[in-house]
Image (cartoon, helix red, strand yellow):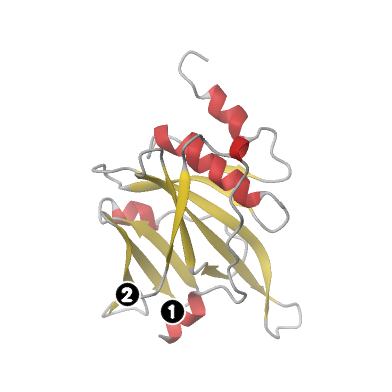
Amino acid sequence: MKLIAALLLASPFVLAVPAPVEAQASGHDSTYTRLFEDCAETPFDDEPVVRIDCPGLPGWPVVVLAAEHGAVVAFSERGIEAQWQERPPIGGIFVNIGPVLEWRLDGAGAPIATILRYRYEAWNEDGNGTHTASQYLAVAALREGADPGACHVAYVEAGQQPDANVIARQAADYLAPDWQCGVDAPIIFSLDSEYDVLTIAAQRRPGH
């Protein structure tokens, strides 16, 4: 349990209020599960790594690969190694993941994407303790029956953008449904981004 505790964000994860209607696709909604609750740990024999299997939503187990400096997450066993290769741009020595996982649901209530907070920590200049160097909300598209079962769509800079949660939900609603895993590269959304999610979604429409 010490490893699990170290992976959690140092400060409590605050659930954002629902985004305005115009900021999310019609009929879409969110549900939430907590990471590291009711999970099963399987240590690796030859290295300080632990596999943590956690319940997600029906048909979508959450599999965390955790080590001393952080963790990576997969949703389903399909293409699990490829999923574990994905994470936001590295911004520190240690990476912590939020204890709450947001699942975006389409109008029929089916999961289409997840949103998870990553916080990178770096050593203080005096070597005493660490500080938060950067934060991202990672948006992953879910692919039922496909291999891989999920892949990253967007990384939303969350340390400075006050509307980071809204942007992440837009990416989940408008980009994730037709995202091509293994073909499309994740998009970073920051204060310096030239285009917003809705503009990119419009550009991706057939015939644009």
Q: Nearer the viewer, residue 36 or 189?
A: 36
Q: In percent of the image, x 51 and y 74: which residue is there?
A: 8
Q: Quadrant of the N terminus?
A: bottom left
Give the structural element (helix, strand or loop) at label 2. Answer: loop
Q: Quadrant of residue 20?
A: top right
Kind of residue at disc 2: Cys
Question: Can you give x and y, in whole percent of width and height, for residue 170 in the image?
Answer: 56, 40
* Nearer to us: label 1 or label 2: 2
Which of the two residues, 79 or 63, is positioned nearer the viewer here? 63
Identify whether 134 is placed above or below 112: below
Q: Residue at x 46, y 37 (%)?
A: 27
Between residues 177 and 191, which one lies in front from this camera angle? 177
Question: Residue 118, position in %: x, y?
Answer: 55, 62
How far apart are labels 1 and 2 at the CA level? 10 Å
Q: Give, as a three-letter code, the residue at label 1.
A: Ile
Mark 2 crowdedness (10 Å alpha carbons): few <14, some 14-19, many ≥20: some
Question: Which picture quadrant has residue 202?
Answer: top right
Q: Would residue 62 be found to the left or right of residue 93 on screen?
A: left
Sequence order check: which comes first, mark 1 or mark 2? 1
Write down the residue under mark 1.
Answer: 4
How busy is the neighbourhood of tag 1: few (under 14 within 10 Å), some, or many (20 plus)? some
Q: Which residue is painted at 50% across and 24% down in the image?
A: 204
Numbered disc 1: secondary structure: helix
Residue 39's tag is 2
Pointer 1 with pointer 2, Cβ within 8 A: yes
Between 19 and 37, the residue placed more toward the observer is 19
Is residue 186 shown left or right of residue 55? right
Q: Is residue 131 shown to the viewer in this render?
A: yes
